[in-house]
Amino acid sequence: MKGPGRQLKGLGLAPFRHRSQNFLKDVGAAARMAAIVMAEARTNLSGAAGGFAEGPGKCPETGPREPAPAPEAGSGIRPGAAGVQVSAGRAEPGSGSVRDAAGDIPSASAPEVLEVGPGLGALTRPLLDLGLRVRAVELDRGLCLQMSGWPEAASGALDLLCSDVLKLPAGSAFIHGVRCVCGNLPYGITTPFLFWFLSATGGTVPGVFMVQKEVAARLAAGPGTGDYGRLSVAMGSWFEVREAFTLGPGAFHPRPKVESAVAVLSPRRELPSLLSPEALGRMTRICFHSRRKTLINNLACAFPRGRALAALEALGLDGARRPEELTPLDYQRLTAELGGAGAGPADA
């Protein structure tokens, strides 16, 4: 099998450094990651609650759509519900499925997963080989075109969207109904993507992501540690986080300067009630605005000091503590007590 370097050269493509493109070339690691995705998707299929996982049509699209890039002549790329949908078959605009020329759709019994940044398909191929139906979002037009020629794109097992995943609205029919979200994340968008993932899924859908090892450490970090921060609180409130395995720079092309790890985010049995990821995200942005400041001094940048002190007193929290000392539950309670986040430098 050709490595990513030779594949890209054969396609007349090259990695975009500004997009943090590092293509996975370790076949064994891709197979291990796909097996984890399958296990998480099956668990979600059998036991998950509703919301994001209920399927297309259960939640109307919300928010403005991003305008689709103009298709290139003869490119085979067609406008979709959000971005550009690619198919060797016939696209149903906004349906989130691709039909072949006969109008057949793969069996609905196979779990559907969303892959972010499939690239050359290193993870996509083992996902398909396991019998999963894959919806893939890829920003690179050239990579979209090469994958659109796969037989699975015609049969409907692979549904490809050429778009920026961060611009997809949470209610998009393309992403609604998937049982797991996965991908070898471009390191440059990891943190904003993880917050998008939480907001889009409401914490009800598992995630399996290749990230920098230091990001995996932050995801799983507990209170009182140097790695503990906004990401730890947000993800720890909705997910059980574990590190599945690590990979060195040699597993990718081009070689990154850091080690990588596969982080698995499994939805908690009891999710935060009456609390949105967006509200918690705003609160943690305020509280972690300056790690050197005390909790009350950070809060006072966004709320009247008296109101912040009253909220802390009602919850039995000491405003002299540092933000990394509070647990995710503390932050959930503080968000509920103070309501919407205030204005001020912490929201900049």
Image (spheres, helix red, strand yellow):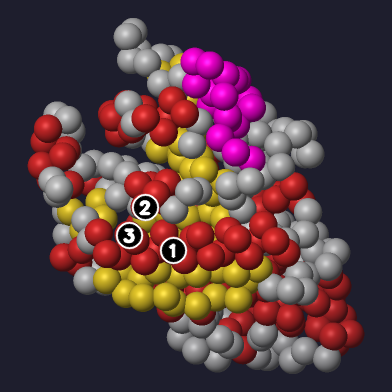
Principal SS element in the magenta part? loop
Question: Which type of secondary structure does the marked residue at label 3 adopt?
Answer: helix
Q: Are marks 3 and 2 in contact (CB under 8 Å)?
A: yes
Q: Which amino acid does label 1 sit on?
A: Ala
User: Circle 2 is placed at which residue position?
Assistant: 126
- Picture coordinates of residue 201 (x, y %)? 66, 53
Q: Distance between the residues labelled 3 and 2?
A: 7 Å
The residue tagged with tag 2: helix, strand or loop?
helix
Which picture quadrant has residue 288? bottom right
Residue where numbered disc 3 is placed: 30
Residue at 42% across, 75% down: 244
* Image disc number at residue 145: none
Position of residue 312 relative to residue 120, above or below, is below
Identify which amino acid the numbered label 3 is placed on. Answer: Ala
Name the mark on residue 35: 1
Structural crowding at the residue carrying mark 2, measured as other residues with C-alpha within 10 Å and reported as few (<14), some (14–19) or many (≥20): some
Q: Residue at 44%, 77% (x, y): give it.
A: 243
Quarter of the rendering occupied by the C terminus: bottom right
Q: Residues within 10 Å of mark 3 (few under 14, many from 20)?
A: many
Residue 105 part of the magenta segment: yes
Location of residue 103 with respect to 250 vertically, above or below:
above
Residue 279 visible in rendering: no
Name the N-terminal-most of marks 3 and 2.
3
Decide if residue 334 is on the left or right side of residue 347: right
